[in-house]
Amino acid sequence: MNIHEYQAKELLAKFGVPVPAGYAAMSVEEAVEAAKQLPGPLYVVKAQIHAGGRGKGKFKELGPDAKGGVRLAKTLDEVRAAAADMLGNTLVTVQTGEAGKQVQRLYVTDGVDIAKEFYLAVLVDRGTGRIAMVASTEGGMDIETVAHDTPEKIHTLDIDPATGFMPHHGRAVAAALGLTGDLAKQAANVASKLYAAFLGTDASQIEINPLAVTDDGKLMVLDAKVGFDSNAMFRHKDLAELRDESEEDPAELEASKYDLAYIKLDGNIGCMVNGAGLAMATMDIIKLNGAFPANFLDVGGGASKEKVTAAFKIILSDPAVKGILVNIFGGIMRCDIIADGIIAAAKEVHLSVPLVVRLEGTNVEEGKRILADSGLAIVPANDLGDAARKIVAEVNKAA
């Protein structure tokens, strides 16, 4: 689960992380009132969407010469103009895709004079089973370019969660940022507090870009991106309330209501599979046969008729889908129950695209018999390779 920048900064401030003063705004007038509460004379008006690259983004409804989603303002009138430009319009960035995201919230913050920008992030390193702290002297909007062109400027420090953040970790972060003296102490303090926030909220990512040195020698978090482990949200009811469903893909949001793992992709063959590994293999073999999957969808180990029906509806909500491949291994799940669910779902959604089904496992013969006797145009498959070849052929034939 991701949250907005203003929510992230409010949360980090509770852990003692230094952030500039700022206020969220849902309207132009609220943005102006927010600015009035700040010392000025420089304000920053920021579009709040779940995507990076806002500063270099463009609004669909405005001309190509219009400024992006992060703007400096020196007067209240400039704050008002910036807010009027952003609210209700669609911001397109390198991370939103061409569709962009509609701006429904703003964040008005106190402007600071920046002497130097850095990058600092805390992540889960699944390869080592540790927490990684990533630091770079090259902070700012082009950190992706830095990672690609000059990876030697990015330093990664592994922290064992069994021992936690130690003083030497703080010194290592300061050294990676090239800071000495009082700034080195500030960097170690910020890193320590970010680590505490990471553990305390069950975060999966805390990204600070930029972490800035101000002209008066203070280290300040100017932008923050925070994401949480959704599986831990039952422990954090207060954090779960920060979720902004309008920022999420409607199909993925619908899938979460049925405990389905769904991610939309760019192909035209919908996939319904049980098990993440099997789903990945299914997508791979579709590509091996010259086509592209339209989604990742894992119905889990105990799919009911209701879940299967919901899965079909979600797959077909994508207009790009021209065929569906169902690949089920009946271990915990019985193939005959899955077959009943497939038939019920196909009838309810009035399925009009080719459907290939491969079943294997518990009660597989009964499941195949149920599908064969259904009277529906369901193409059976003997194995995964056979299923992939058949769905690709069916889609190509219908094109």
Image: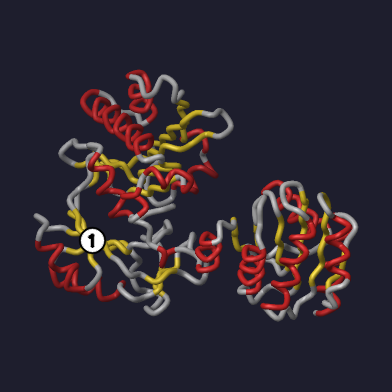
Question: Quadrant of the rendered structure where residue 47 is?
Answer: bottom left
Query: Is 241 on the left-hand or right-hand side of 249?
Result: left
Q: Tell me residue 153's x, y (percent).
A: 46, 35
Residue 30 image offset from top left, x and y in percent: 18, 69
Question: Foreground residue, 97 or 56?
Answer: 97
Relative to 356, does residue 139 appear above or below in the rendering?
above
Q: How many marks?
A: 1
Image coordinates for residue 2, horizontal then vertical, percent: 41, 53
Q: Give 357 or 58, whichever is nearer the viewer.
A: 357
In the shown orientation, is residue 361 left or right of residue 123?
A: right
Q: Secondary structure at mark 1?
A: strand
Type of the residue with mark 1: Ala
For this rendering, which residue is in front, 270 or 254? 254
Dot 1, how many residues are within 10 Å of its Cα: few (below 14), some (14-19), or many (20+)? many
Question: At x 65% / y 69%, what residue is drawn?
Answer: 309
Residue placed at 25% from the left, 62% from the top? Answer: 45
Q: Quadrant of the C terminus?
A: bottom right
Residue at the location (47% across, 35% down)?
A: 154
Q: Is residue 105 above or below residue 61?
A: above
Q: Is residue 202 above or below residue 186?
A: below
Measuring 43% from the left and 58% from the top, which residue is drawn there? 51
- Is 221 on the left-hand or right-hand side of 360? left
Residue 334 shows up from this direction: yes
How is the rendered protein coloured?
secondary structure
| Residue wearing tag 1 | 24
Tell me if residue 300 comes above or below residue 56 in the rendering: above
Q: Quadrant of residue 69?
A: bottom left
Residue 388 visible in the snapshot: no
